[in-house]
Image (spheres, rainbow, N blue to C red):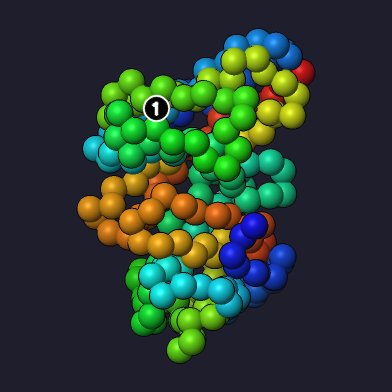
Amino acid sequence: DAKTTQPPSMDCAEGRAANLPCNHSTISGNEYVYWYRQIHSQGPQYIIHGLKNNETNEMASLIITEDRKSSTLILPHATLRDTAVYYCIVSPSGTYKYIFGTGTRLKVLA
Amino acid sequence: DADVTQTPRNRITKTGKRIMLECSQTKGHDRMYWYRQDPGLGLRLIYYSFDVKDINKGEISDGYSVSRQAQAKFSLSLESAIPNQTALYFCATSDPASGPNEQFFGPGTRLTVL
């Protein structure tokens, strides 16, 4: 079973920030939080990952709560091309083990 | 050129046939993975390989076998295909030396078993 819980779907207006939540209440101390997205039926694409601290890159920001039991992926200015299924995954660093849940289907509206 | 390629991209076959799906990568990564995805669901791990001599079963390996012919090539075989193996199959690679296990996925192979 997936170790994360995400809402099945969300809508966001184009140009607005998209905030995608993820609960991972059983996360262990050595487990990272990873976010991937899958556009249509393409291969998943890595977005960002973090352990404790908030992280930002050119695609998104990742906010992890202090107790690490939940996180939020932020797409600061969503575009139509951000319409995709977003997966939140927790996994120990250096291991193979990704367990994908069903993700959040984000629809960006014009 | 894509870093992770999969062939074929689409395949329709019949029950009982042997099928091979191939994955090649130019990223120089040691770790390679095979996943399947059923409609509306996330990806599930079939097999993974940490190097040419190291192959391991994932969560749904029954009915599948793999071969790691070289660092760059990882093949998935269905010895006798059955309809419930109809799915989207993805290959992925990773290099733990370059960070916490970011995986790079190929474009996928859509397999239909009639």
| 10 Å crowding of disc 1: few (<14), some (14-19), many (20+) | many
Which quadrant of the figure contains the N terminus of chain A? bottom right
Q: Report which quarter residue B16 is drawn in.
A: top right
- Residue in the picture at 60% in, 67% down: A4
A102 lies above or below B70: below
**Three-letter amino acid code of the residue under disc 1:** Phe
Q: Among all residues in the image, which is located at the extreme top?
A: B17
Q: Position of residue A110 (x, y in %)?
A: 66, 68
Query: Would you place residue B80 above or below residue A101 in this image?
Result: above
Write the residue at 28% across / 52% down: B96
Frontmost residue, B45 versus B13: B45
**Residue A61 found in image quarter:** bottom left
Q: Dot 1 falls on which chain? A: B
Q: In this view, does A49 lie to the left or right of B43?
A: left
Q: Mark 1 points at which residue?
A: B74
Residue B3 or residue A5, whichever sits in front? A5
Can residue A80 be spotted in the picture?
no
Q: Seen in the image, is B22 located left or right of residue B110?
A: left
> At which x and y percent is residue A104?
65, 64
Q: Which of B105 and A78 is in front in this view?
A: B105
Q: Above or below — where is B108 with respect to A49?
A: above
- Please provide percent x and percent y for residue A21: 60, 76
Residue B107 drawn at (x, y percent)? 49, 37
Query: Can you tell which quarter of the image residue A92 is in?
Result: bottom left
Q: Residue at 36%, 82% (x, y): give it.
A: A53
